[in-house]
Image (spheres, helix red, strand yellow):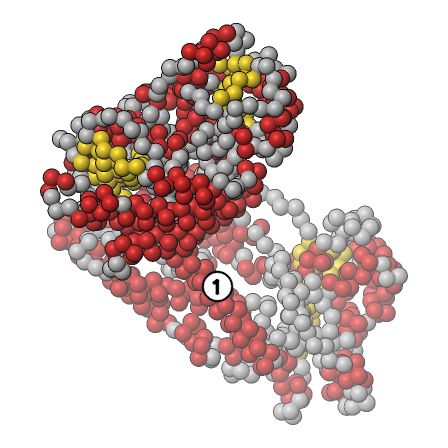
Amino acid sequence: MASRILAIFPYPSYSHQVLHHSLTQALAEHGHELIVFTANPMNKNITNYHEVPLIFSNEEYKKIFNHFDMKRLDFWSFSPGLYRFGEIICDATLSHQKMQRLLSSKDSSEKIDLIIVSMLYWDSLYYLSDKLDAPLIGLTTFPDISIHGPMMGNPLYSSYVPNYLTPYSDEMNFFQRINNLYFNLRQQYEYYMVNLPIQERVLKKHFGNDVPPISQLFKRICMAFVNGHPYLTYLRPLLPNVIQIGGLRLTKMNKTLPTELKTILDKSIRGFIYFSLGSNFKSVNLGSNIINAFLQAFSELPYQIIWKFESDSIAKKPDNVYINTWLPQQGILAHPNIKLFIYQGGLQSSEEAIDSGVPLLGFPIFSDQFYNLNILIKRGVARALDINTIDKNQIKENIQEIIQNSSYRDNTIKLRKLLEDRPQHPMKQAIWWVEHVIRHKGTHHLHTRSQDLPWYTVELVDVFGFFVVLIVLLFLLGWTLWRLAIAMIKAQGWITFNFGKCLSNSQSDIQVQHLPINNFMNSLKSLNYETQDVYKLPMFTQSIDRLSLEIDDIREDKCRDHAKLIFNHLQNVTRWAIKFYDASAKFPEGVLGGSTYQFGNFDECLNIGVDNYDNVPLGIHGKYCLGEMTIEVPEFYFIRNDTIWVNFKKKYERYDNTISKLHWGICVPASCSANEIQRVVKRLTDYVFEGTDLIVSPVITNEKCYSKEPLTADVYDIIYIAVILTIVMLIVVSTLFHAICGKNDKQLPQNMFHQISNAFSMISNFKKLCGPGHDSNLNLNCISGIKFLAMVFIIAGHCLVFIIGGPILNMDYWEQAVGKAENAIFLNSPLLVDTFLFLSGLLFARILLHELDKRKSVNFIFLYIFRYIRLTPAYLIIVGLYATWLPKLGSGPLWSRMIEEKARCQTSWWTNIIYINNYINTDKLVSTLYLL
């Protein structure tokens, strides 16, 4: 079916027009009628082929671009001229008499069935698709569509696809990726913000203000032909409406040679080198230094040089150099004596050289020439010269390397075979797609949704921005709450001590305001006996002189020797000995405010003698003990209600502080047993409080004493780790299998392996988790949401309990915190637990009713077995963690409190596994609330 096709190619570059004319001429030979607006008419007598010369295009091009220096030519200095040139060309093309006649014609026989426009900087011409009601195909001679790609739904891949204006390959380092991204963004910015407003100005000039924005006209481009090939470009994903037609014109190249030139080439027995910079750049403009460098290098070579030089003569031209202002490139490249092609890196010249099996020496100057040459260098068929550093030696060495190293020609022939090995010739492919567009009046069936979305939606900027804002807000909220909590705590006097590293390997940065306590204590010495007892209460740790006497009375020999050594070095202010004193708790702070724990520094004590950094004597190591000091006060101390002894009276009313015992951290030699330490401390307290009615009873046990020990693993620990690693491996393998072998469960083989992989696959489980459930007709999202929120509040309440009950905060804080309104929702809300349990039962009852409706009966034994199998694996993992590795995952003076469940797991694991722990050994429950 013959169709009328309008083609517009206003760019006055012969190399560009050759590709355009090859396609339009082939379409005419297929019976279509072509109306071609071109800056370089062929002037051939072809049936159904009507050329409209755009001669003004050549003149304007020369005015704008002839003044550029090749060495300083870059895209950003070149692009403003292109934008101005595009405005002039589009204005002149739309004003052309024959274009106006096409636009105003009402004759149905003159209807245009398809428009082909070269894609560069004449975007206002896309509006012709609307005016003539014809589908539009874009055609570019570049190997990539980085400018128009995003507009057609093809995103930019700045991470591994270099912009064709950069000298990078697809193996970019970090800074090259930054620059590549900069090129892409700047190119897009200039195109949208500079070029498109210019084109819209042209559009409004010819068609009025009631025209769509240029950005909307890109949707009219139903297909793009790109002069690329997977082997001549860097691989990247392309939508099906982008067709690569690299090598389209190679079949119909004229390879005949003039007689004179053929004779010269035939006589070049040792071979010849062909040198041409294409149609856009002239060798005569290279500059005398570069020209002389080439001439000197050529004079030292044994090969004939064929140089396309735009002048009749060159000064000091060697005898082996032949110049001419025009040369038949295809015929020269096809000659058997050719050794090398020196060129500017143009894509069309690259295709012609590869088609003839000729290796290349590139001389890139501008635009996509660096891009093209980098690919050929990567393929092993070319080398490159740098226009800024070129000299005779560089030219000669590169020429000799390429000619003498046969791998370049071999790789060129191999690349040619790859380019030829395709299911369909690119010309036939292009014609088929042209006729496909005509037959279906466009390619709406290939339209991608990304063309309709704003760029920030396509690139997920809004999604990432949402998460960034969310994270920032959560951080600000947490920071605000933290500052508010600190302000409230400081205002109410809750923080009264500096505990150092106590619970784990973390430090508190809370600074303590130390009072001038010595002056205060000195003022108490002259008061009555009750006040003197208060004076003595905190002083026993300062009885250094008495300590030296007690050391001599230590019964354990090794402990006594180490203690004496430490005491002697302590008097000499030796660093390692001072650490024993420094790591021990000193004056008790905030006791009346509820701070009954005085920790000292746990890690400092345990690290003494470990790495021998302080030259600690051999065998001496630190041992941290957290002792309890029970203080019994006689009844007659409570006669007055305004003394501090009231705080020592046992009470049960909320908010009344009761001091029953103090906890004191001390650092001692590791060679001392807990019993011996307790005995020495008891003798010290008896000495300090001698003559008072206070009874101070220290208790130091092995369970509260810690020393540095290497991490060990028994057989149960190893078994647990092996089980966990096996589960992790199953999850990873199953997920990879699911992702690679089938995105849909139905695509996977239905066998035992599939069932196992489906059970462990994160993809499958995520679908089930987010899916509608068994009965999609019944929407229980609201109930599930309430259950989820109840669970969140329950977990938050327990987290708050752990925080409040930890060693960082005073015990008095717990007494007051439980009554705070902001904490009541977490701490005083049994309804949350009731809600969670009620909804869990409700959902389970629904399952039972659903089974009754479906099967008219329920197999309770099977139901219990199924639920047991479902719950027990996760339960066993938690029980195993508590029974094996949990005690080894942390350390600290109160760490034993955090791992009390280890003993419960080891003694009552069987009651937990068979779920009778609510009836037997109820005091040995494991953390199962969140699982069950």
Residue 689: % across, % down: 77, 77
| Nearer the observer, 286 or 26 | 286
Task: Judge whether 538 appears above or below 755 on screen.
Answer: below
Q: Is residue 834 visible?
A: yes
Question: Residue furthest toward the left?
Answer: 108
Q: How many marks?
A: 1
The amino acid type, in three-letter code, at marker 1 is Val
Residue 639 occupies quadrant: bottom right
Task: Judge whether 833 appears above or below 594 on screen.
Answer: above
Q: Is residue 404 visible?
A: no
Residue 684: % across, % down: 78, 70
Q: Residue at x 86, y 69 (%)?
A: 545
* SS assignment at label 1: helix
Q: Residue at x 73, y 74 (%)?
A: 587
Residue 754: % across, % down: 30, 35
Task: Judge whether 276 appears above or below 785 on screen.
Answer: above
Q: Which residue is mark 1?
A: 472
| Nearer the observer, 36 or 176 | 36
Task: Judge whether 579 appears above or below 223 on screen.
Answer: below
472 horizontally vs 93: left or right: right
Q: Quadrant of the N terminus?
A: top left
689 horizontally vs 289: left or right: right
Q: Callout 1: few (<14), some (14-19), or many (20+) C-alpha neighbours within 10 Å? A: few
Q: Residue at x 15, y 41 (%)?
A: 111
Q: Residue at x 56, y 44 (%)?
A: 175
